[in-house]
Amino acid sequence: METTRTLGRSGIEVSALGFGCWAIGGEWQSTDGQPLGWGKVDDEESVRAVRRALDLGITFFDTADTYGAGHSERVLGRALGKRRDDVVLATKWGNVFDEDTRTLTGQDDTPAYARRALTASLGRLGTDHIDLYQLHLSDLDPTLAAELRDQCEELVSEGLIRAYAWSTDDPARAAVFAEGEHCAAVQHALNVMQDAPEMLALCEESGLASINRSPLAMGLLAGKRQGPVDAGDIRSRPPAWLQGFGDGTSADPEWLARIDALKEILTSEGRTLAQGALAWIWARSPWTVPIPGFRSVAQAEQNAGAMEKGPLTDSQLTEINRILGR
């Protein structure tokens, strides 16, 4: 398979697989104590995992200023070090947080805050520009979003960012950003259990990259069958949008049954289950760039290994749709 893809109409080339850096931010929370991270993390292992990914051909890393309340950006910046120019760096803004208490405190949708947040992200990441700057407020009013899109165009003209995107699951909202000349992508949920045909159609029509969060369904498509998760892990108290985890004590049995029904196809050609889930995404559209999370060198190696196996075939896609009744 082609191991690179282009970020929409930006001309920016990235590895066909990106790495999502939410998990390496460690623990953080909302003001009411809801966990928003993935539990405890070993920063030294995170740094080793990022560097291993680089060695394996991963050139696209996606984070957000709020992951770990700034911690993910700091760890990623340290891991990249002098290799910053070898990668395409994506981060997000819109949430307000307290770095000392690691708490999400609110959101700010003003153009002035976009600039302040960018300045802070540049400092944490140790760089002078962001390649892809993404609005992190998924349900923002489209009129306000249009003002932020125009602000992003200014930031592009100043050389502070190269391109921008919106992290949203609503195609109508994504289309508002797509009107901007330097809009390159939309980040949205996509995995074999949660298809997004309307969003993929928009990406194709508008020439946008489809950056795919939750490509492994928060671990369920990596074969994770855990019982209760750590208290500091978002999956222990799953918010309404987080499907597949029931009440937080274990995975949803219906989801597990459907994943079991797909296992034979997803593990074809010697793939692991996670590699098969990524192969489905690549087969789904040439615009896709999945960004699975990772917390260890072993996970980095397994995810990167999916690129060698390439996408599933059209007939395998058809068979998966038949099994899932789509």
Image (spheres, rainbow, N blue to C red):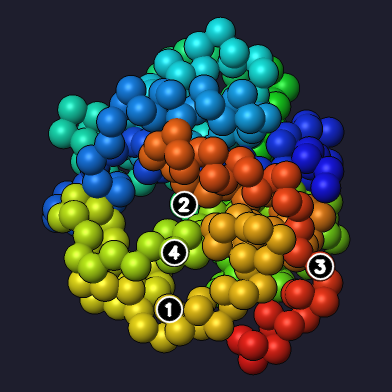
Q: Of helix, strand and loop, which one carries label 1?
A: helix
Kindly tell me whether residue 7 is visible in this rendering.
no
237 in relation to 293, above or below: below
Q: Nearer the viewer, residue 7 or 229?
A: 229
76 sits left or right of 166 in the view = left
Q: Nearer the viewer, residue 72 or 170?
A: 72
CA gap, disc 1 and disc 2: 30 Å
Question: Residue 236: x and y, percent?
Answer: 22, 62
* Residue indicated by mark 1: 256
CB within 8 Å, label 3 to label 2: no
Which amino acid, by three-letter code, is at mark 2?
Leu
* Residue indicated by mark 2: 137
Kindly tell me whether residue 28 is visible in this rendering.
yes
Residue positioned 38% across, 67% down in the render: 242
CA gap, disc 3 and disc 4: 22 Å
Single out the residue that lies furthest toward the bottom.
325
Q: In which quarter of the image is residue 229?
A: bottom left
- Of labels 3 and 2, earlier in sequence is 2
* Residue indicated by mark 4: 223
- Of labels 2 and 4, earlier in sequence is 2
